[in-house]
Amino acid sequence: MTALAAYSDIIFSALLLFGLAQLAWFSVMLHRRGISGNIIQHTLPPMMAIWVLMWPVYIDSHWLWLGIALFILLTVLARFLPHPFMKRLRLAWTPVTDDPTFENTSSLLPMFHFSLALLIAGIWFHTIPEFGFGLALTLCLAMPLAHWLDRMGHLKLGFPAHPEQTLAGHIAFILAAALLLCWALHTYHGTPWQPLLIATLIAAMIGSASRAIIPGEWYRPFAMLSMGLTMWLL
């Protein structure tokens, strides 16, 4: 093992720390320029996907907990540290909505539901790496894709918990999540894609149902839990 490989986990953690500092700075700068916090919050997960793609490269998966802890620590500082920068970060990372189905999030940590969902994906990764890897990619890529399609407002489905969700958003989520889960399984086992599609499509549809029926942002952690259980059962 080369010296670089021996310290690769430390290097990845340092890169994540630098990346989180950059995400916080960009979030604050965008919020100061009048960009809605809701837009900022749905822009961050695809950036976090850059780090998730490093998960299979970790030599010791325990270092993954340090990465997740660093992100949660940043949200704790944003919530409780009485510094102007952190106060602005809290505003940028806290959902604001007039939808009565969304709970009052003022008492929660900023990005709380995303952090909880990321933690659940990390637990799956530590237990069954191929599942956790695919679920984390789904959280960071498929869910934001569905959100941005929902914002276009075409063919709204009128779910009581999420009246803004659209048919295009759900179809995109199912296809993207199924492909990401397939790719994660293929990455770890080299299994052909075709036999995996049925199982991953079922898991993706479970995640889509979670988006539809679980109120507020709680659908994120619930989807990570339910999709993982579905994959495990199948």
Image (tube, rainbow, N blue to C red):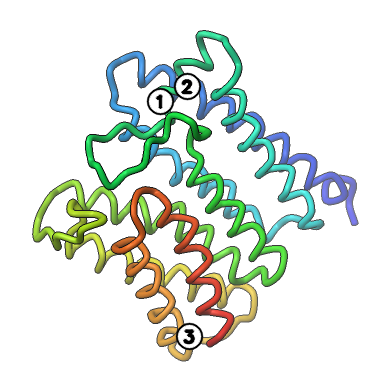
Structural crowding at the residue carrying mark 1, measured as other residues with C-alpha within 10 Å and reported as few (<14), some (14–19) or many (≥20):
many
Q: In this view, does 136 lie to the left or right of 163?
A: right
Q: Nearer the viewer, residue 88 or 140?
A: 88
Q: Which of 54 and 215 is in front in this view?
A: 215
Q: In the rendered image, which residue does mark 2 sit on?
A: 89
Displayed quadrant of residue 143: bottom left
- Give the residue type that dot 2 points to: Leu
Q: In this view, does 100 lie above or below 77?
A: below
Q: Is residue 60 left or right of residue 85?
A: right
Q: In the rendered image, which residue does mark 1 sit on?
A: 92
Pinpoint residue 102: horizontal percent, then vertical percent: 32, 44
Q: In the rendered image, which residue does mark 3 sit on?
A: 196
Residue that sits furthest to the left in the current view: 155
Q: Do the residues labelled 3 and 2 touch (CB within 8 Å)?
A: no
Structural crowding at the residue carrying mark 2, measured as other residues with C-alpha within 10 Å and reported as few (<14), some (14–19) or many (≥20):
many
Q: In this view, does 68 lie above or below 204?
A: above
Structural crowding at the residue carrying mark 3, measured as other residues with C-alpha within 10 Å and reported as few (<14), some (14–19) or many (≥20):
some
Q: Do the residues labelled 2 and 1 touch (CB within 8 Å)?
A: yes
- Give the residue type that dot 3 points to: Leu
